[in-house]
Amino acid sequence: MKVSYFPGCTLKNKAKDLDMYAYKSAEVLGITLEEIENWQCCGGVFTTAKNEIATKLSSVRALKEAYAKEQSLVTVCSACHNVIKQTNYAMQNDKDFSDTVNRYMAEDGGYFGETEVYHYLEMLRDLVGFDKLKEKVVNPLAGKKIAAYYGCLLLRPSGVMKMDDPENPTIMENFIKALGAEPVIYAQRNECCGGYVSVESPELAKKNSNAVVRNAKAQGAEMIITACPLCKYNLVKNGADIPVVYFTELLAEALGVKEDTNE
Amino acid sequence: MNNQYLREELIRQSGVNPKKCMKCGKCSATCPAYDEMEYHPHQFVSMVESGDIEPLLQSESLYKCLSCFACIERCPRGVEPAKLVEAVRLSAIRKQGENRMTANDVPALLDEDTPQQLLVSAFRKYSK
Amino acid sequence: MQRVGVFVCWCGSNIAGTVDVQAVSEALKSEPGVVFSANYQYMCSQAGQDMIKEAVKEHNLTGIVVCSCSPRMHEATFRKTAAAAGINPYMVEIANIREQCSWVHKDIATGTEKAIILGKAAIAKVNLNTPLTPGESPVTKRALVIGGGIAGIQTALDIADAGFPVDIVETKPTIGGKMAQLDKTFPTLDCAACILTPKMVDVAQNEKIRIFSYSEVSEIKGFVGNFDVTIKKNARYVKEDICTGCGACVEKCPMKKVPNEFNLGMDNRSAIYIPFAQAVPKVATIDPNACNMLKNGKCGLCARVCTAGAIDYTQKDEYINEKYGAIVVATGFNPISMDKFDEFAYNQSKDVITSLEFERLTNAAGPTAGHLERPSDGKSPKTIVFVQCVGSRCDACAEKGKEYCSKICCMYTAKHAMLTRDKYPDTEVYVFYIDVRTPGKNFDEFYRRAVEEYGVKYVKGMVGKVTPEGDKLKVQASDLIANKQLHIDADLVVLAAAIEPDKSARPLATMLTASMDTNDFFTEAHPKLRPVESPTAGVFLSGACQGPKDIPETVSQAGAAASKVIGLLAKDKLTGNPCVAHSNELMCNGCSSCEKVCAYGAITYENKEFRMPDRTTKIRRVAVVNPAVCQGCGACTVACPSGAMDLNGFASNQIMAEVDAICK
Amino acid sequence: MQVNEHKPLIVAFCCNWCSYAGADLAGNNRLNYPADVKIIRVPCSCRVNPMFILRAFQRGADGVIICGCHPGDCHYTSGNYYTRRRMAALFSMLDFLGIEKERTRVEWVSAAEGAKFAATMNDFVEQVTALGENKRLEDLRCKR
């Protein structure tokens, strides 16, 4: 199966691991990620104001390209996923917004949110299936206690993201189980790490990140996985004393396609 | 500044109906940036509704909201306070020369691991 | 042709002031069918009514038109007059020339002109009136109460007290309902069991009452006075009439790891069980999903220890048919699921519990024998946080909660907080509230006592997040008065979960053709004046199935429902409203259009033999209206594509005649 | 009949439980509305057959209004919902035939809304008067 793929800015720079392992693992699972040509940065955060148009156009372009290829659009980074899915939702449901955007783009045919947007995790769950993933695992991570860190972007707003229950999510936990490890449930998993406010108030980010790590550890976690480069940055920078890794890295390890050499 | 006009503009642009608020305070209870804020999420809702917007425009609280959407998700009345905070922030930074963050500020923020996402997001939130 | 008499009332000057009554009665004299026309000062007075009676005799009248006040005022009066004069009461029509003419128009010319037109319309209608006789149907003098909680118990006892037999159908193995699970009751703090269990015993001992426990209603047919109900008695694998409730089987049963529903899963029961010591009927029940003997035929221990020989592994579900005159719905409520509110970590920590679970934790017959212990480690909690309005008062579009106020939570939380502080004074107790709602006798005093005498810390604000960490529950909340965010390390968090109608209510409403609101609460016939009757005749509402209620309210409603039932059962025959629909079977093509719009299920179909012109016979499906069930709205008459359906008293040709008379 | 001042003829169907009682209340409170309105009592607004309305227009009515209980308050639970749907279809068909939409109306008036009843009637009469005489569906044989 082929899907369109939107990597986003960070995955081509500071989070190359997240990107590389996503590619490799997808191949093993029979999915080819076709990178959107000339993709532009999603903007990092979705501006909720109804009259903010221009900053959302890059997402619309990516969505349109996937639509033209009749493919679903897959993202890995939580932020890209959040922005693109919210933009797509607005294109579907906010007529003023979609009309303005379509006029602005002034290309043939309007776009009204037809493309299906999947987060990589959703792709694993809904397109691959965790059962099938389990079959493909060659290095089961047995006995490892892993805490899934959702942060804020993956699940909320739940009415738009429609990924999982926003307060009691199971998708990453089931992912961890499929890899043979043991998920650790902890309440702070869907609380914010401090996000972009770390440029403004590093101490706020520190407080939040520490609360997340402390809670995960208290519930027995030996490792935290995340889908978001900013989450990883905040947790690590603020002194996480257990490993914080991208979920794709863990996936690649379990599927046996992780290379030991650091590129 | 005509408060009534600004109030309506904020409500229109955020899509939030502050009248739905039943003043339970769950938004402020769930806010992870609460202690950093001078005005808290529930105050944004009630102050916008009453047209008392000027103090909000001046407040540092605008730049402390994480846009984590916890208040939006957990509000029992579907009020969506974070969207209102965003609308007020945009009214503040959309004014000429009122960008909170400029490109000149960036080098000082960088460290070896700073993800691009951080800068992009901060720029989106703190400047036009 | 009718012989119509017209009687124009002056109503003192009320009508005569703006309408020339003399001119009206003169003008109407020449209308078709009119043989007599007169006017009088007060038609409704004895003299006025006598005048009508005399005219009927003298002129041999077959129809009467009274031009007077609204029919809502005196239609009944003049119908009685007609009956007294020996003509069918439904041969009377009223022209409303007071409320809808003289009182709203200013000058005599317009008023008179309009009054004449209204009079003509009434005459045109009465010319087409036919005598109607209200149907009668017998009343089965037995009532069915669905649900055996305090509402059902009270209703059944009151009905039985009046001498009518009552059956209670309860899905659980015992009656008692939610109240049996409670510890104390507000605001007097009586022990729930102490006031409920005697009533349960009364039910068991009352000769007029039969209890169908572990049973459900599977089919309801018929109508007011004549319901035909099928009750499904689920197999409990124990012969009810033989079991003595000694409990030997329960003790010996090797399968002891079944979550105990009565204690909300906080401890275990055996596969054969009696829900609690005071259960009524006190009979054991085998849980077929847990019993080894029923699952794979290996065990049979209970049968061996039962000296009475009551165990019967081959028992089958049994269906019982019974006729009832009235049905009372008392299906009650349940707390909503906390799955969608996991910001409070209900699914993450055993120490986050609902208020009903808290009741069991503090109940002497509960899993901890009444000692307040944390479910996780059995330690006694030192800091308890109560959260109000969890799932109540949510926005309508938020799918997870309920839009309404659950009404009972403020009071039971005050009770829990107060009792905790009373029994364990060194415990810190917080209550987070949005509003404290205490309208009820001695309710606010009770809440204030919790604050002032017992030192419960009431905080205006909500809890936003509960984080279980180590053996603590980190509670993050807002204090709106202090404008602060609070961080409390709690040992126990108690959620006042919203309540919702029992899941069995919706299918039951369909069977009863009783209406429900969007929240699945039963709707009452009138929210103020008929609060215990459902709009469906013969169906009554008792307790929380109609809306959130506390015990005193439930008991009063239960009594009110019972008195309505008694009033119905005391009659030997029911007189119907004759203004009901009827189908002309020659025109009916059996298309079912009418049945679909009937809100009462009054229309059925039967196959009937018709003679064809060529002398053959043909069987056709035709609609039949049950006049005892039809309420006479007329929806079917318009839905009928062939014009077979018509409505007595408001027939199509009558309304058409009125239209013609007005437009002439 | 005066030539220049056309008095419209309005037929109002009122349900027995809400709107007819609302009309009575308007009377009790002496709230004036034009005598052009003639009320026909029906058990429920859903009893109003489209035929009655066609008949009224055919016989020279200038406007027809149907009043029922508010949605959700129907004495018969759901009757007014049928009215709402049936009349929406009928009125647009009538509009197509040339009976302007302004000549037809469905209004919800409760038993407590005497003032609303009077206000509605005043408004409706004014609206129909403005349109002038209805000739479109009028059967010449029924000419007044």
Image (tube, coloured by chain):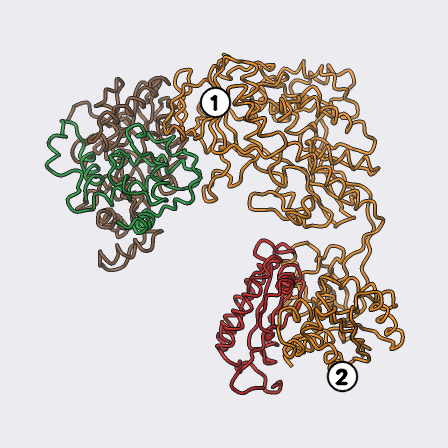
Q: Residue at x 71, y 77 (%)?
A: C20
Above or below C476: residue C33: below
Residue under label 2 = C30
Chain for mark 2?
C
Q: Nearer the viewer, residue C609 or C525?
A: C525
Tell whether C137 sits left or right of C419: right
Q: Earlier in the sequence, mark 1 or mark 2?
A: 2
Pinpoint residue C176: horizontal percent, then vertical percent: 68, 28
Q: Which chain is brown?
A: A
Numbered mark located on residue C457 in the image: 1
Q: Label 1 is placed on what type of residue?
A: Lys
Task: Residue C78: give x, y in percent of width and height.
Answer: 80, 65
User: Quick check: A255 left or right of C79?
Assistant: left
Categorize mark 2 by other alpha carbons within 10 Å: few (<14), some (14-19), many (20+). few
Image chain in green: B
Q: Amino acid at mark 2?
A: Ser
Q: Which chain is orange?
A: C
